[in-house]
Amino acid sequence: MGCVESMNYEILLRDQSFKECREYVRQHFKEYIDVQPGFKVFDVHLIGLPPIAIGLEGDFIVFPYTKPCHGTFLLRMEDTAEAARLRTFKK
Amino acid sequence: MSGEPKTSPGSALLVLGCPQVPVQTSIALYLINRLKKSGFVPVVAGNKAANTLLVIADPDRHYLGEVMDLDRAVAMISDKKRDFDRCFVFIHNDAGISYAATMGAISRAKVFTLVYGEHYDDLVKQIDFPCTIIAAKAVHNPLPLKKALDEVTPWAA
């Protein structure tokens, strides 16, 4: 279990395919970055088909979180420092 | 042991999926056996349930070697602390596809995808990244997937 699971998070999507989660981020968030699998958000190395879209909305971060038995969740979490760090990866 | 290679062809990581489809544990033990006979050092990475099914089935570790948590394996490979020569990803749902694509992206290993379950053909259509696909409609009976594995012989050097 990563610390993500002990933090406050909102589940935006569940029981969706990874690709559906990626499209949701691209369609619903004006600001997003594309990263490669293994990219670290909080303490989680992201799982998914490249590219993986991470949405940014103020201090909120929206990212896919995949578990073998439960599929991919799209999580929304608030963290000022992590959002600022992720914005440094914008091209 | 006689008949086994004197030098190891390398290491092999088995990435287990959710163990809800019964053939996974059986095929994993079979694959580990074939890999070991070919000189590979197999390492298993799965969630707690998938790993425990294997550990309980092989208490004296005749087949199993190192077993690790899946998240830890992804972290170590992503951080370039460890890697493998071959990687076998067990797939019976969308999450399995995501893990296989991830392994293809973060590891230098040659990736083999073992696709099974009721909807294996739909899953195969979603695989659009480089890998060797080994697929069969296998849920309770492991023989169709064993046959597909034997045809590919991924344990060959």
Image (tube, rainbow, N blue to C red):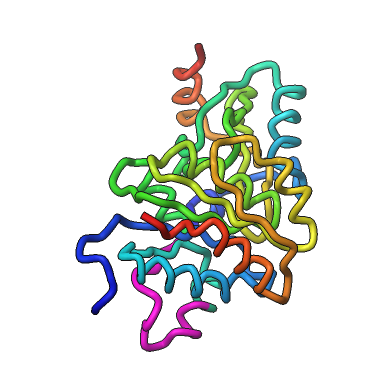
Question: Most extreme residue toward the left, as rendered?
Answer: B6
Viewed as shown, does residue A1 lie left or right of A66? Answer: left
Q: Position of residue A26 (x, y in %)?
A: 71, 23
Q: Quadrant of residue B149?
A: bottom right
Q: Position of residue A67 (x, y in %)?
A: 60, 54
Front residue of A72/B84: it is B84
Q: Position of residue B103 (x, y in %)?
A: 48, 44
Front residue of B134/B101: it is B134
- Magenta segment, which residues? B54-69
Is B133 colored magenta in this rendering? no
User: Is B123 situated above or below B63?
Assistant: above
Viewed as shown, does residue B154 lie left or right of A13? Answer: left
Is B59 colored magenta in this rendering? yes
Front residue of B23/B38: it is B38
Q: Residue at x 35, y 65 (%)?
A: B38
**How many callouts does the rendering have?**
0
Front residue of A59/B100: it is B100
Q: Residue at x 46, y 39 (%)?
A: A38
Viewed as shown, does residue A14 lie left or right of B113? Answer: right
Q: Residue at x 44, y 84 (%)?
A: B58
Q: Position of residue A45 (x, y in %)?
A: 47, 43
Question: Most extreme residue toward the bottom, as rendered?
Answer: B60
User: Is A64 situated above or below B143?
Assistant: above
Q: Residue at x 54, y 42 (%)?
A: B131
